[in-house]
Each structure stands twice: as C-alpha cells, then as structure tokens.
Amino acid sequence: MQLTWADCWMNHKEDSLNSSEQSFCDAYYSEAPTHRLYDLRWIFLDVDEDDVSEDWMEVQLTNLNSVFLPWGFQFQTNEVVIIADAVAESDDYYEEWTLREILPDLRAQLGLSEDEQMALDELKDELAARHVSQEELDNITLDEEYNTAAAFRLASRARSESITIVIRPGLDASGKSGGPPPEFQISRGSVLELRSTLLNGNSLTTLPHEMGHFFGIGHTHAPDYNEAEADFGFEQRWTRMAHDGEAIRRVVGEDYSQPFGEPYLAYDGSGQDLVEHQELMGEAFVWPTWNFLYSGDQEKFNSLAEFVQAGEAGETIYRTNFERNYGFDGKSVEWYGMNCFWNDSASEGQCLFGEDPVIRLNNQHPLLQDSIFFENGTVSNLMSYITPPYEDVSSRRGITDEQEDMIRFTANSPMRMLLYNHCLGTELCSDFPDNQDDSGGDDSEVGPVPEPVPFCCTGTSTEIYVAVGIVAVAVALAIMRRKR
C-alpha cells in the first residue's frame, strides 16, 4: 500500500523507514506534487438502496472532475456504503449517542466485529494506523458520547486515506464542508455533507462548491448585511490574525508584496517547520480575500499589499459580494438578497451597490472580472452562490489565482496529506494538463479551521440536470454496498 506523507513524516521521526520507503518519501514528499488523484467514499445514511443510482454518482463525479481538472485535482470512487437505518442521523446536530449505540453504523462503514470490545479495539487499531495520537485513543470509550457530526467524522478518520462524502436527510442545507485543522493526530476526521434530496434533484454546483471548502477556500460573499454596502471590518479582522501576521509575512514579505506560491512542509522537516506551517494555516485565509474587496467608489485592490495599506490607513473597505437583508424591517428599498447574481433578462452577471441611486455593474467591470465572474461573465466563482446557465458542466467553476494558491496550500496541510494521492509513483495522471495557470481566470473568509463545519451552501432550483462526459478518468465503481 502506498505511503502517505503522514506515514513518511511519522516514520522518519521514528527512524523506521527502510531503503525503499526512504526512496519513495524522498521522491514524492520532499516538494509539492503537481497533480492529485484522490479516492472518494460515498456514505448514504437513512437512504434506501433503491434510491441510490450509480448514474447519479457518475454524473456528480464527472462534473466534479471537470471543474477541478484545470487545477490538477481529480477524484475517483473507491467505496459506496448504504446504511438504510442509521443510528447517528438526525436533523439535530446536538443529539448524542454513546459509541456503543452507534457501533452498528461503524460496523457498516468499517467492517468491525460484532463483539463490542473487539469492535472498539479494532476501531482504535484503525485510527492508530492512521496516526491518531495515543492520548486521543485513550479518550475513545464505549460510553463516550458523539453527536451526529462527530459520529461520521470518527468513521471518516478511520478511513483518512479517502475523502468521505456523507449523504443524509437531516442536513439543514444542500451541503456543508470545511477546511482542514492544523493538527493531524486528532480523532475527528473531515467530511463533505450533502442533503439526500439532491439524489432527486438537479444540482451540479453543490459538490464542487463543498470540495472547494474542503480545500480551504471560503465564500466570496458576506452574509446578513443590512446596509447598501458591506463593510469588511478591517480592524476587527486584522487584529484577529492568529499570530499577529508573522506567519503570513514569512511567506509574502514584510510589505506583503511577494507571491504566496505553494508553501510546503517536507516529510523530513523539523518540528519548528511543522509549527510554522500550522501557524500559517491560521493566517493564510487572508491571501485570497483581497480579490473580493474594494475601497472608495468600487476601486479594486490589485494586491494584498494595497489592501493592507488601505486598511491600516483607516480607509473603509467593502465586500464586493454580500447578502443584503433589507426589506424585512419595513423599509422601502429597491432590492435585497444577494447583490451579485446572474441577470436572466440581460444574459450577464451583475452586482448592485449602494442606493439613491443603486449602482449596477456588469461582469466586465474590473472589480468583478476574473474574481466574481469569468469567461465573459458566463462562469461565476466556484465559492459564490451565483449560478449562470450552463451547458455541460457547472457554471460555478472559476477561481482566482489566489484561491488556487489556497487550495494547493491546504492540500499540502498535514491533515489533507493523510489522503492517498494516486498520482504519486504511477502513470495514472500522465494525461493531466501541465499548465496550472489555466484556472479560468454561510460564512466568513475562513480557510483552515479547528472545527470542520463552518461552511455551507444552498442549491438553486433552476439548475438543469445533465450527464457530462468531458473528462476520461478511470473510475473504479467497485461498489461495496452494506445494509445494517
């Protein structure tokens, strides 16, 4: 079985790598990979087997690959588990069960023994093999309580070599996901969640959007503003920098003028290297942010340095994309809702700002072009809620160069480096594009976060269900279906 970065890191620290393992680690975990191919686990909770269509998964997967191909990310199905009567499934995120009570779910996902104590021991063995710390393992008992999210995140951590997608009816949005935490020896894994109503729907935007969150990029928009323009709140946000800006300045320079690039922690790095990488994860969220901000009369920032300079000078900085809630307090206003949207009548992307009069900018405005909208306005940012019409692939598939930096950086985070990258040491990814500059161009701008449920999205009812066949990726749909 292929070694992960985490295997190489931990075994290097223990001086236990043999010569062939050392060669593999040297070749593939000394610098960032150019391409990535990850396994997916589809876990269906409280969903009947007859309601799960292979065609639906294939369409979702092919579309996901179409969206992420320009950035060198691809995905393949590794496992499908259907638990028709799941224990730990509820529309109440705070409802709890003991581990003893949720063992049926864990058996279905992980193949654990019927005997309770044996199942617990096997679970801990699976987690230990994936570098969960002994302290964390000691806290896992049959009487330990888990809420809905914690239950399937425990199972996902025991399969951390794959990306787990949980499809369930109790989710309060179309999808939820979040970026990786800095610490990788914890027992809480990462999961993308999709609402099971998507099985009967037509959305091609939700899964790629949530995968964007999984790799650390937040929404383009600010939620719940009752002003005509959304104040970014520079001072408050800047003073919340996790390490006073020192971590981000190590990368972009004291004047914030250097490119972010793709910071990478080599498997044989020092403990201090790990600390600095973790500190950067607490501050890197600021790197893509300035693309979605402006000052003055819709004046675009051209760099992080310009953004910081304006903020430190006391200028008011605004969000380009935001959700305005006017109309619910009795005021007479011209609009509310998302200020950036696809205008069907004009057949173009537009954004509204201010009032008396309302300013309407189209997709070609410098503030919007190649940040909110791409490809002459026919494509919107992956992390927005703006969905132009599409033909054969989701039209929410554009990201900025800075967002691309961010997904690569978080893909290099220790928690995400628990994943198997099937490109390494194989020819599976030889057909991937070499040009990585072809990027097409609920929540705050949080990237890596300690609790991986900060992001969510809602689908739209106007999306058209289409089968797409753009990317020829070998998809192993060796489906392992289990019912409790």
Image (spheres, rainbow, N blue to C red):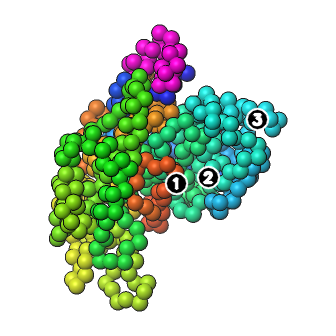
Q: CA distance from mark 3 to mark 1?
A: 28 Å
Disc 1 packing (10 Å; few <14; some 14–19; many ≥20): some
Q: Earlier in the sequence, mark 3 or mark 2?
A: 3
Disc 3 packing (10 Å; few <14; some 14–19; many ≥20): many
Q: Earlier in the sequence, mark 2 or mark 1?
A: 2
Taking the image as shown, residue 439 lies to the left or right of residue 165, namely left
Three-letter residue code for mark 2: Ala
Q: Which residue is mark 2?
A: 149
Q: Secondary structure at mark 3?
A: helix
Three-letter residue code for mark 3: Ala
Q: Earlier in the sequence, mark 3 or mark 1?
A: 3
Residue placed most toward the observer, 308 or 70: 308
Q: Which residue is mark 3?
A: 119
What's the mark number on residue 453? Answer: 1
Three-letter residue code for mark 1: Val
Taking the image as shown, residue 381 lies to the left or right of residue 191, namely left
Contact between labelled residues 1 and 2, with CB atoms less than 8 Å apart: yes
- Residue 17 in the magenta stretch? The answer is yes
- Secondary structure of the magenta portion, mostly? helix
What's the magenta region? 8-29
Image position of 397 with respect to 225: above or below: above
The location of residue 257, given as percent across then percent down, is 18, 45
- Residue 446 in the magenta stretch? The answer is no
- Residue at the image position 63 percent from the left and 38 percent from the top: 136
Contact between labelled residues 2 and 3, with CB atoms less than 8 Å apart: no
The location of residue 292, given as percent across then percent down, is 28, 59
- Residue at the image position 18 percent from the left and 57 percent from the top: 309
